[in-house]
Amino acid sequence: RPRAFDDLAVKRVTAAGLMKQQQSFRRCFYFTNTFIANTGEVYKVEPFQLPPPRDIAALFKDKAPHGEKGDGSPSTEATARVLRQRSASPFRERSPRRSSFNGTLRTRGRRKLAERASGSAGSGGSGGERANGSDYGVRRPSVDSFQDDMVDVSSFSLFKYLRVEMFGVQDNPSVGDAAPKQIGNFLSVPFSLESFLRLGVTLCLDVFLYVLTFMPVRVVYALTMLLLESISAAGCLAAGRLSSRARYFHRTHAFDIMRGLILVMGCAALSVLDMSRVYHYIRGQSMIKLYVLSAMLDIFDKLMCSFGLDAFDALYWNTRKLVHPRSLAGSFFVVSAYVMLHATVLFLHAATFTVATNSNDQALLTLLISNNFAEIKSFVFKKFARSNLMQLASSDAVERFKLTMFIVSNVIVSLTQDPLEQVGRSFVQVFVLTMGGEVLADWTKHCFITKFNDIDASVYEEFAAVVRLDVVHSKKENVILDHTFAVTRRLGLAQIPMACVVLRYLSIALVSFLGRWRTPFGLSRRAFIAFAVVVTFLVLLVIKVLLGVALFFQCAKANNETMNRLRKRSDSIVERESMARLAEISRFTVNLGKVW
């Protein structure tokens, strides 16, 4: 039973009761034996009691064109086609098989229904015959249908030929009103896409700031609870009543402490890498090597994002269930190794981008921008479903956020080493080239994907509605884990490795500032570093709180408007069903054999 029917009054009827209804129907779901009337009422037929295909076609007689009833009607042919799909689908409703003989009878019964429908779709033939060599209701063109296309060459006139070529006395019947609609949909895709990507990038920023602000607070709180637990245990042990001690420390606190340790280990692994050596090594390579290196780092980044989400889920599950201490230690080791490796990959990617932005001829930057247009060839000429398109749009949102973080990190480091005028002039040009190439590539890619797969531009509003629903549910549910889990899973963002890279760049900028400038207010180096860390943390905390509150109210308002619109419309059941399917898809969910 689809989720979209949960909020509606479903009427259960038999086949005879369905045929007695004095109204016409507009939609039929064969997999669930559900019929939707033009008035919006939903009828559920009991299993294995569907009427014959001819009777089902009569329910939709108001949709058939005038003069097309009975044999050869489009509704009958569509019914036969749906019956064949149902008999071949592995998701059809089945009753428990009592014996192979009953299964054979059911298969023969479906085959007879399909043959009866194909016979009714034939031209004047009997119920079981196949007219004009048709295969289960699919009519094949006969030789007589081409008689009107014969041309008399002997009646050719040069005057008529010139008149037709110059004045065009005939209208082209193949051009209909579909072309203007396709062009309008094609031109509206960039606006709908940017609305979704703007929401996705903002959510990525909110999740990223959570790692730098609220996660350290949770770690400190968990350590405080651990200290109180130890003091309480020591006092009860000294008093001889260990069983009656108060419990302060829980397993979720242990999970927060482990995530804090993983973040520290990732930053420590990046501190081993010397930025100057990595920079000059990358700069000394040839253009082709850097192009291949950048492509490889991009591929490994996506693979590790998929692995990292599952690794953190496994660590959380082992922490909550505590199946065995050895299993928990193994999960912690795997996640720690993953974060260090993924942070190294992102650091090398950021260093490659730094070399590209600081090169004089900017040939490497142009080469890196061409990677975006290489995606057009990879994605445009492939079949896409709506769920796959949602995964691709989520990937584009994360890519834009990652590129923005790389640019901001390079700007912060350059401001501590070069004058402000020089940094501003060079990085404005870099920002325009990189983000302009990214935006143009995304627009071209999504416009042609929706065109070739006949997808409406309003699908991006459904994507945004699903993401906003994740934000609203994560705030109102009693979630033990942090509220960013659902959004991170949907978009596929690796926030902890990215935080390690940004913290490494901030440490490089702080060291460069202390080596070039004097500390203000006469503070010592250690006092200035502590002052800078506290001020930066407070600024980021204020930004995170304001951004989180604004996001919640915006998502809640837009979600309420969407729900009210769906309740008022009588034909919103299809849209609800589509959103229910999209809600089960995350970025790295294998759907229709594909994952992006």
Image: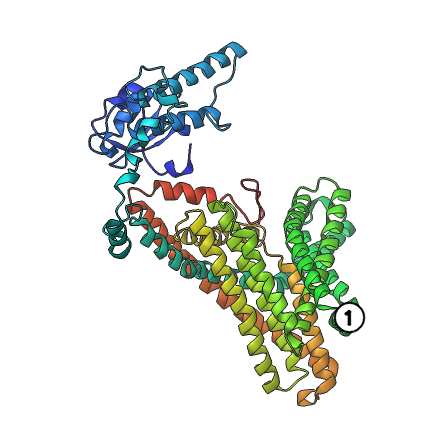
Can residue 472 be seen from the camera position used here?
no
Q: Is residue 592 left or right of residue 510?
A: left
User: How many marks are shown on the rendered structure?
Assistant: 1
- Relative to the observer, which residue lies in front, 202 or 118? 118
Q: Position of residue 30 (x, y in %)?
A: 39, 28
Residue identifier under label 1: 281
User: What residue lies at 48% left-to-right and 28% top-to-bottom?
Assistant: 89
Residue ID at (71%, 64%): 288
Find residue 562 and report its horizontal and vertical position in percent.
Answer: 36, 52
Q: Residue at x 59, y 64 (%)?
A: 370
Disc 1 marks a residue whose amino acid type is Tyr
Q: Is residue 431 depicted above or below 92 in this figure?
A: below
Extreme-top residue of the structure: 101
- Against 469, residue 433 (above or below) is below
Q: Position of residue 425 (x, y in %)?
A: 57, 82
Q: Which type of secondary structure does the marked residue at label 1 adopt?
A: helix
Q: Nearer the viewer, residue 565 or 291?
A: 291
Among the 4 quarters of the image, the one containing residue 165:
bottom left
Q: Nearer the viewer, residue 455 or 504?
A: 455
Residue found at x 38% / y 27%: 138
Q: Quadrant of the N terminus?
A: top left
In this rendering, does residue 556 appear at all?
yes
Query: Which of the pair 593/233 is nearer the observer?
Result: 593
Q: Place residue 268 in its image quadrant.
A: bottom right
Which percent across, then down, holds residue 239? 76, 50
Q: Residues within 10 Å of mark 1 (few under 14, many from 20)?
A: few
Q: Is residue 26 left or right of residue 242?
A: left
Looking at the image, what colour scheme do you see?
Answer: rainbow
